[in-house]
Amino acid sequence: MVPRQIKKHVKDKSDKAADEIFSPQKRPESGRYLIQVDKQTKASYETGEAAHSAALEVKKGYPVVRVSIVDSIENSSRLVELPS
């Protein structure tokens, strides 16, 4: 019986940089305000108004889920509720 040869893929530096940017464990955060749906970050926005309007759209479509806006600079969060 002939032993199998296993080939290893050797990554160069450009492959490593691409893996860090598009890693499934961590999304790139470009904006200050993050939208979290059931404690999972889904999107980021530069302004609080844009984040609030996007969070309201998510909440209107799925009223059961917990939607919050997190300020990544002040380390604060607020829960988004549908208007009465």
Image (cartoon, rainbow, N blue to C red):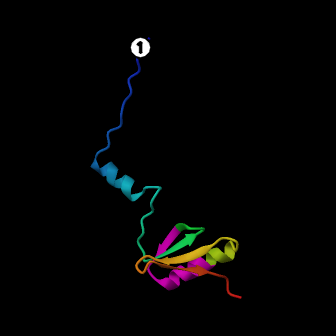
Query: What x and y, as percent, mark residue 79?
Result: 59, 79
Outermost residue toward the top?
1
Residue 77 versus residue 18: which sits nearer the camera?
77
Whether 30 is drawn above or below 56: the answer is above
Residue 75 versus residue 57: which sits nearer the camera?
75
Residue 38 versus residue 49: which sits nearer the camera?
38
Q: Quadrant of residue 61?
A: bottom right
**Does the stretch in magenta take in 47?**
yes
Name the magenta segment's main secondary structure: helix
Which amino acid does the dot numbered 1 rest on? Val
Query: What x and y, as percent, mark residue 49?
Result: 51, 85
> Dot 1, crowdedness within 10 Å: few (<14), some or many (≥20)?
few
Image point 68% across, 87% down: which residue? 83
Q: Can you identify the residue that label 1 sits on?
A: 2
Quadrant assignment for the N terminus: top left
Does residue 3 appear left or right of residue 54 in this picture? left
Query: What x and y, as percent, mark residue 22?
Result: 42, 57
**Does the stretch in magenta take in 65?**
no
Q: Quadrant of residue 31?
A: bottom left
Whether 18 is drawn above or below 81: the answer is above
Whether 16 is drawn above or below 64: the answer is above
Over which residues does the magenta segment extend? 42-56
Image point 33% across, 49% down: which residue? 15
Q: Secondary structure at mark 1?
A: loop
Image point 47% across, 55% down: which residue? 24
Residue 62 versus residue 66: which sits nearer the camera?
66
Does residue 52 appear left or right of residue 62 in this picture? left
Query: What x and y, as percent, mark residue 30?
Result: 41, 71
